[in-house]
Structure formats: C-alpha cells, structure tokens
Amino acid sequence: ALRARMLALAQSGTAPVPAAMSCKWIACFIALVVASAATSVAQAFVWRASGADADAAPPSPPPSPGAVEAAVRAYFSTQSNKDCKGLVELLAPDFMLEDPFGTPPVTNASDVLANCQGGGAVFKTIALDVTRVFVAGGGAAVEWHCGSVTTRGCVLDFDGVDEFEVDGDARITAVRGFYNASIPAKQFNCTPPAVVA
C-alpha cells in the first residue's frame, strides 16, 4: 500500500520523487528502520548481559585487606567473649557456615545465635585464639587454637584452620572450618579431675 501511494503521488506531481526511485526510497526507509531496531535490541542485550539494572544498587567495592582481617578476628573474639549477638551481626544476610567442613551448613542467624548461647552455657571459658591470618582479596585463611574449658573442668586443646569469604561491606558470607572433630569430642567428654576436700 505504501509503494502504491508513493507511485500515485509521483504520478500526480505532488511529489518530486520519480516513480523509478520510489521503490529505492522505500527500501532505504525499511533498511533504516530495521537497522535502528537491531541496534536498539543489541544495546539492550549488552546492557542486560552486563548485569546493569536501573533499579538495582551498584555493587559494593571489594573489602580492604584490613577490613577482612578485622572481620575474621572479630569472628573469634566475639565467641571468646560469649558475645553471641555481636557474632551474628558479623554475618551477611546470605551467609553460610560449614564448621567443620563436610557437615550440613548453617544458614540461619537464629541457629547461629542458639548454638553460640548453648556453647556459652556449657563452657566456663571459651578461648579461641587466632595465631595467623592470611588475607587474599575478599577472603582469608585463619589458623587458630582452642583452649576452652567446660563447666565440668574439661580442657579443650586443639588447632584448626578456617577459610572465610567477606563481602564489600566487610560482613562474613562464608566460613569453612578444618580440624579433626574427634579430638574436641573426646576432650569434651573427659573424666573431670577429682575435687580435693
């Protein structure tokens, strides 16, 4: 219909375009529209593929090495101080704790709080001492020693290594603990020393 209209306008003299040129003009016009649409689609695809979202907050910058080390040290100090609320506040909303590695991961803040409070009730003192910290990017590996004492007088004496991941807000997103769990289990169930009257 557009071609017939262009031909009619050309024949009526109301358009200066010769009839022979009308098809070329239509072809050029169609090519221009198609090219423009293809460019828009391609730009939209690249924008979406890059993860850009006008409604999304910009990603957080990676944490500094100092922030990573501070976060992982606080992870141990809050437990040693029986500061269970402080421990939970160190964790990102989508955290994962696998401690020791290979056990079902804990991903619920209320479970972390309950476990921490339960530990505080059965231990007279909790001593988780950081011996070395190795930071790389947004993660760290931490060597530590446990010297906790139960309310029954049993002493835990063992070492381990924890692997951490920390987000741009310096909150812990993942912890994986590596140690021989049979050692503290045996020490926890010790025969308490006899009380001398």
Image (cartoon, rainbow, N blue to C red):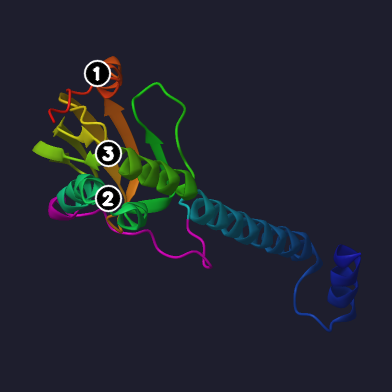
Disc 3 crowd rating (10 Å Cα; few below 14, some 14-19, many 20+) is some
Residue 131 location, quadrant: top left
The answer to whether marks 2 and 1 mark residues whose Cβ atoms lie closer than 8 Å is no
Which mark identifies residue 191?
Answer: 1
Q: Nearer the viewer, residue 185 or 52?
A: 185
Q: How many marks?
A: 3
Q: Please report whichever mark, 2 or 3, sits nearer to the chain's N-terminal start.
A: 2
Image spot of residue 36 (x, y percent): 61, 61
Q: Write down the residue under mark 3.
A: 123
Residue 91 shows in this picture: yes
Q: Amino acid at mark 2?
A: Lys
Residue in the image at 77% along x and 60% along y = 23
Q: Please report whichever mark, 2 or 1, sits nearer to the chain's N-terminal start.
A: 2
Position above or below: 18 against 159: below
Q: Amino acid at mark 3?
A: Phe
Which mark identifies residue 19?
Answer: none
- What is the spatial separation of the Cα atoms under label 1 and label 3, in whole angstroms? 15 Å
From which residue to which does the magenta span run?
Answer: 52-67
Q: Nearer the viewer, residue 73 or 150?
A: 150
Whether residue 54 is in magenta: the answer is yes
Position above or below: 150 against 6: above
Disc 1 crowd rating (10 Å Cα; few below 14, some 14-19, many 20+) is few
Residue in the image at 28% along x and 58% along y = 61
Image spot of residue 124 (x, y percent): 23, 41
Which mark identifies residue 82?
Answer: 2
Q: Amino acid at mark 1?
A: Thr
Disc 2 crowd rating (10 Å Cα; few below 14, some 14-19, many 20+) is many
